[in-house]
Image: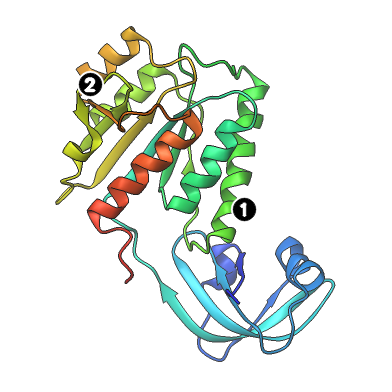
């Protein structure tokens, strides 16, 4: 059985050391004790969302939480290059599905984008609620995929802000079904620090947006002969680049 992961604050794991006892309470403790029903001797991981992973053996548990004895502590390095996915807002739960899968895929930063042709529109309080919802999805997917690092989910960006991200990246690609260049032509990532992937909405990226992103330095690439949904296109592209860069090699 795969060891479950529980996400704690960094302050709770800062002083973790071999053979120390850590008591896990709050929501994570209740989930482990009451929902997962952890038993003495089970192995679990505690992570802080910033790269620290504590492996421990459960001492005891009840409905309010559980205790572990620390077996090991590891600080996992940030993967390189950093992968940033700009995800256009989408209708229904498609964008949240994208956030979930991008997190599982190992993406480092997810940027919600209010594209000109986005069917979903976030204004005022809805933008704050939307970002918080994406962060909650990312948090749950972090634990499910056993990551030690939370993806950074930024505030809502407009097209001008996305162009600024593109201009500051070592490599930026825009996924587009009419592109002449395939994604596989952009897989030499040696020496790069930041890669930005831009995923458009259901209605597609407008000509004006495409021109702005090209002017900012983006390469426009395609993913093959089929057209993918906005919820899956970024995941496929991130997977291809993660494999090409060696990010998915076990360390």
Quick check: 52 above or below 134? below
Residue name at image x 36 percent, y 48 percent: 239
Q: Tell me, yes or no, whether the two marked residues, 1 and 2, touch with CB atoms within 8 Å.
A: no
Residue 149 x/y as whole percent: 47, 58
| 81 sits to left or right of 159 | left
| Local SS, label 2 | loop
Quick check: 88 above or below 154? above
| Local SS, label 1 | helix
- Front residue of 94/106: it is 94
In this picture the colour scheme is rainbow
Q: Residue furthest front?
A: 225
Q: Residues within 10 Å of mark 2 (few under 14, many from 20)?
A: some
Q: Which residue is mark 1?
A: 140
Q: Quadrant of residue 215?
A: top left
> Residue 15, can we see it?
no
- Front residue of 129/118: it is 118
Q: Quadrant of the C terminus?
A: bottom left
Residue name at image x 51 percent, y 59 percent: 49
Q: Residue furthest right?
A: 63
Instruction: Report how far apart the C-alphas of labels 1 and 2 lie in the structure.
Output: 34 Å
Q: Which residue is mark 2?
A: 216
Can you tell which mark lies on residue 77? none
Q: Quadrant of residue 213?
A: top left
Residue 176 x/y as whole percent: 32, 23
- Looking at the image, how many numbered discs can be counted on the residues? 2
Residue 24 x/y as whole percent: 70, 73
Quick check: 17 above or below 64? below
Please report whichever mark, 1 or 2, sits nearer to the chain's N-terminal start: 1
């Amino acid at each position: 059985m795969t060891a479950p992961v529980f996400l704690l604050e960094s302050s709770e794991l800062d002083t973790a050391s071999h053979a120390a006892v850590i008591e896990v309470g709050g929501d994570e403790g209740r989930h482990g004790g009451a929902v997962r029903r952890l038993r003495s001797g089970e192995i679990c991981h505690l992570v802080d969302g910033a790269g620290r992973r504590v492996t421990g053996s459960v001492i005891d548990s009840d409905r309010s939480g559980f205790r572990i004895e620390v077996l090991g502590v590891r600080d996992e390095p940030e993967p390189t290059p950093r992968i940033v996915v700009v995800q256009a807002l989408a209708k229904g739960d498609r964008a949240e599905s994208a956030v979930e899968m991008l997190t599982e895929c190992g993406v480092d930063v997810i940027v919600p984008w209010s594209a000109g042709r986005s069917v979903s529109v976030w204004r005022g309080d809805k933008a704050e609620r939307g970002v918080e919802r994406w962060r909650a999805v990312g948090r749950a997917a972090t634990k499910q995929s056993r990551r030690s690092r939370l993806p950074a989910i930024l505030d809502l960006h407009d097209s001008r802000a996305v162009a600024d991200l593109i201009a500051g990246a070592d490599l930026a690609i825009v996924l587009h079904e009419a592109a002449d260049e395939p994604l596989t032509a952009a897989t030499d990532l040696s020496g790069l620090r930041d890669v930005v992937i831009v995923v458009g909405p259901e209605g597609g990226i407008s000509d004006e947006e495409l021109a702005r992103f090209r002017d900012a330095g983006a390469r426009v690439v395609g993913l093959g002969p089929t057209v993918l949904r906005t919820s899956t296109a970024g995941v496929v592209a991130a997977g291809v680049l993660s494999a090409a860069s060696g990010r998915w090699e076990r360390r």
